[in-house]
Amino acid sequence: MPYTPRRSVLYMPGSNARALEKARSLDADVLILDLEDAVAPDQKEAAREQVKAAVLEGGYGKRQLVVRVNGFDTPWGRADIQAFATLPVSALCLPKVESAAEVHAVVQVLQSAGAPSELKLWAMAETPRGILRVEEVAAAHPRMAALVLGTSDLAKDLRVPHTPSREGLLFSLSRCVAAARAEGLDVFDGVHLDLDDEAGFARSCQQGVELGFDGKTLIHPKQIAPANQYFSPSAEQLARAEKIVAAWDQARQAGKGVVLVDGKLVESLHVEEAQRVMDIGRAIGLI
């Protein structure tokens, strides 16, 4: 499948009309229009209507639109799902998912509402039970397309401190990456809450790249550019990827069974990774 950039995944409060308008000009790959945490209970229904109107008005260009609905067991969850089942959004983001049964319940509502098969589901892993059952959630249904880490709620429930190393979260982060890769899903790292801590945000992005995440969820537009940078291949990575692919192609054409690039043995797995890096580079305009 062609690579779709999802390096920067920005939450936008559904109750804030100004934010929904500003989002049309931001350089985020994905916008999560939020009806859950960012909206007070007495504003839920008004926010739903406001987000519906914004989606129908359009103007978001290449940015993917995802709507984070309220939990299925809340007074607003089912109505949220029905409201966006046939609207032009890429996915619905489901909070605090802890079982495949929860995904199936949402799928039944979508099917009853006439949702197209292209409408996908993103599941948030943000509770201890959700982490322990993340493999089950990831494999729950073909509509599943991504896992999203909710590290703030998860850290609270696990009773681990927010340290720069995120040591208390590493098991959960890696478990979600493994579950996503096993099922061919994307997976997005949790937010960095301190907007003044630019160095800490940079460390968090770098760690996310090293752990295998596809992108990072964000809470402010100032975080978009750094996230896009960290989750994009560098010029050096692109140059090496091109070199590997070219050397491999030349060796195959010459009937050679061994390929060396800068003195290092290159195998098919290295070529596949190099091709992936090049695909990302093309999709974001670096090649």
Image: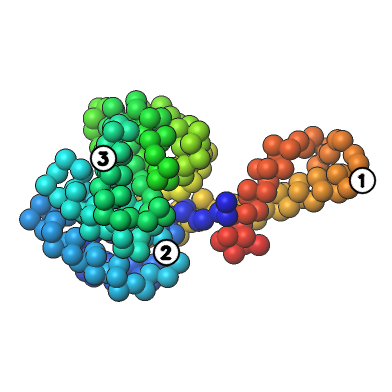
Q: How crowded is mark 2: few (under 14 residues within 10 Å), some or many (20 or more)?
A: many
Q: Residue under label 1, please give it.
A: 254
Compare residues 273 and 263 and report the one nearer the observer: 273
Say which residue appears at 38% left-offset and 30% top-offset.
Answer: 136
Question: For the point 14% across and 56% down, which residue is it?
Answer: 44
- Badge 3: few (under 14), some or many (20 or more) residues near its Cα, within 10 Å? few
Q: What element carries label 2?
A: loop
Give the CA separation, mark 3 to mark 1.
Answer: 56 Å
Three-letter amino acid code at the position of disc 3: Ala
The residue that disc 2 covers is 63
Q: Which is more foreground, mark 2 or mark 3?
A: 3
Q: Determine if residue 190 is in view.
A: no
Element type at mark 1: loop
Image side of residue 235 versus residue 188, left or right: right
Q: In the rendered image, which residue does mark 3 sit on?
A: 105
Q: Give neighbour class at mark 1: few <14, some 14-19, many 20+ (Cα, 10 Å).
A: few
